Amino acid sequence: MQLPLTLQLKPSRIYLIVLASGHTLAGVAVCLLGWPWLICTALVLLLVLLLQRSWRQVLNGPSAVLLRADGKLDLLMPDASSALVEVATDSLVLPWLVIVHLHGESKLPPLVIWPDALAGADDHRQLRLWLKWCAALPEKA
């Protein structure tokens, strides 16, 4: 693997399906509670707004990540800005999901990367390999 390596990100359909399914199940559960229709309608509307906000966060997230040889990560945003972050040791690397916990200048949410969120066919495997390699790097003083 040649470093630095840039991986293009795109919105994940799997994540959209998981979000929509979870919010739909919550909406059905609220409707089955037997509460007055006004409360049920308000709660379902709140769930729709939360789903929209969650999906907007995905769309406004990084458009690419740059994997560096020093074990750091550059988040490239859609507005052409970037942020240099360190990868935390408690990141989760699975064959079907990667959750990268980040340390930076400001508080950053974890970066959740589903296999279909990467543009290249081999990018998910390369990201997992890089993260495992980073975990094996000696700690910095």
Image: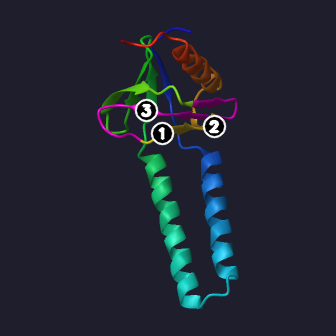
Which quadrant of the figure has residue 36? bottom right
Callout 3, which amino acid? Leu
Residue designated by label 1: 110
Check disc 2 and report its element: helix, strand or loop. Answer: helix
Q: Are marks 3 and 1 in contact (CB under 8 Å)?
A: yes
- Check if residue 16 falls in the magenta segment: no
Residue designated by label 2: 116
Callout 1, which amino acid? Pro
Q: Are marks 2 and 3 in contact (CB under 8 Å)?
A: no
Residue 127, horizontal then vertical, whole percent: 57, 23
Q: Residue at x 62, y 87 (%)?
A: 35
Q: Residue at x 61, y 23 (%)?
A: 128
The Cα–Cα distance between marks 3 and 1, rounded to whole angstroms, is 6 Å
Q: Residue at x 34, y 31 (%)?
A: 104
The Cα–Cα distance between marks 2 and 3, rounded to whole angstroms, is 21 Å
Q: Is residue 57 above or below residue 83?
A: below
* Extent of the magenta region: 92-108
Q: Residue at x 50, y 11 (%)?
A: 137
